[in-house]
Amino acid sequence: MLTSTGKPSISEHASSNDAPAIPFQSLPIPDTNPAGSGSAEARLIHIYHLVARAQGHQALLKTESLVQDYPHFQLAQLLYGDLLAARARSVRTMGDVPDALLKTATPVLNELHDESRMRLKALRERPPPGSIPAQFLALSPRNKHAIAVDASRARLYLFENRPTGLTLIADYYVSVGKSGVEKTAEGDLRTPLGIYFITSNLDPKSLKEFYGSGALPISYPNVLDSKRGKTGSGIWLHGTPPGQFSRPPLATDGCVVLANPDLAQIVRTVEVRTTPVVISQRLQWVTPDNARAGSKSFEDTLAAWQNAKSSGNMDLLLNFYSPDFTSNGKTLAEWTPSLRSELDKMRGHPIQLKDLSFLRWTDTTDTMVVTFGEVANGTRTGTTKRQYWARQNNQWKIFFEGVIG
């Protein structure tokens, strides 16, 4: 692999003929680019297109420019080395280093092959136009953006919540845990699966260089994680250290890691506290209408809960809460006096749910994460609450409720 220092320039190798093609037959290259993807990746994919069309000289020119702009982009450097080698000999495969170097280079080559494969996989398996991840049932106007991570494609998708609905505006290559996903314990080197929210935006000046251009911590463990006994903390979206443009697909201690330019774009875009982050082994893409149609029974139950609370009938209201309910360490019996106090203060005034959003997480159980502002009629302000509902024996029950603002 060539480095950015002392590498031969294209002028030393240029000719009027295209270089011999690097064999990309096993990597079909769709004639498309990721939506709003980072400029370095978009340029890399364009070079892949040129190589696939046997336009070697043009690919070489584009690749030299790319590695000059991003000298630490190892995958681009690998391709640059192949294109230079292809001018003098037949190149058998990507990363076709001399046999004498193959033994020591194999681990790094395998990681770069994995990265290339995952970038191309996400390119070949684009979300259907207008579709959204199935978890995003309804977002309020306060949720200006949303993030979804698909571990099977090593991909992060960034959405803007417009008046017309969620719109995919960009997607990026990411790295996840060395041991994969489905985190259960501290130190297991896995990335968690579930629905989270960005909790803060850490100043890069306060971070070690390892975290790159910044960090966005997320709310792991969430209520469902804690209920299931999962441990660990400190799961962030963050960048890469100086000298490393991107990392292999499975390379982190559990965080989701992006190239620094991509992370910087996300940091500039999203808001703390209101941005949901879904992390899935494999995202299911559906139309917005189909997503909402699947939540009809829950929406009916939520409306019934709202009516029960508006009525002030404590016995009726308690029917919506699960026996294993907890709220900040309190059992249902310990928390019930707080609920009764709320009803007393309302004095029979109906409640309105403002800025309602709900997201669905389905694995071994079916869970709804609901956020809303609760305002009693006749008052100007209220509290922002979050509830976790689970489907139990075909009935939706609340197993957590708490004030978040």
Image: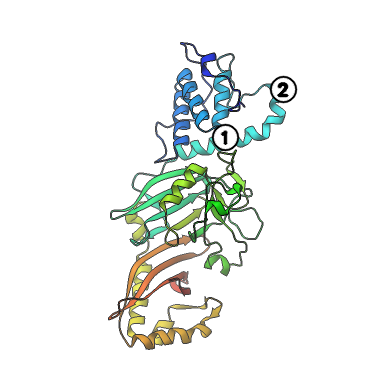
Q: Quadrant of the N terminus?
A: top right
Residue 205 position, x and y percent, is: 55, 52
- As displayed, is residue 117 above or below residue 13? below
User: What is the count of numbered marks?
Assistant: 2
Query: Which residue lies under the disc numbered 2?
Result: 100
Give the side of residue 169 with respect to residue 212, left or right: left
Q: Element at badge 2?
A: helix
Q: Which mark is residue 72?
A: 1
Single out the mark in the foreground, 2 or 1: 1
Residue at horizontal 55 percent and vertical 32 percent from the top? 71
Q: Disc 2 versus disc 1: distance between alpha carbons?
A: 24 Å
Foreground pick, 253 / 228: 253
Residue 48 % position (x, y): 47, 28
Image quadrant occupied by the C terminus = bottom left
Task: Tell me, yes or no, whether the two marked residues, 2 and 1, touch with CB atoms within 8 Å.
Answer: no
Q: Residues within 10 Å of mark 1 (few under 14, many from 20)?
A: some
The structure residue drawn at horizontal position 30% and vertical position 84%, both measured from the top left corner, is: 349
Q: What residue lies at 61% left-to-right and 47% top-to-bottom?
A: 210
Instruction: Classify mark 2: residues with Cα within 10 Å, few (<14), some (14-19) or many (20+).
Output: few
Query: Mark 2 or mark 1, which has the lower sequence index?
Result: 1
Q: Residue at x 47, y 21 (%)?
A: 61
Which SS class for mark 1? loop
- Horizontal and vertical percent for residue 106? 67, 31
Residue 399, horizontal then vertical, whole percent = 49, 74
The relative height of residue 141 versus residue 104 in the rendered view (above or below) is below
Please tell me which residue lies in front, 91 or 37. Answer: 37
Q: Is residue 13 visible?
A: no
Which residue, as the protein is rendered here, is positioned at the far top?
Answer: 16
**As shown in the figure, which amino acid type bears the numbered disc 2?**
Ala
- Give, as a three-letter code, the residue at label 1: His
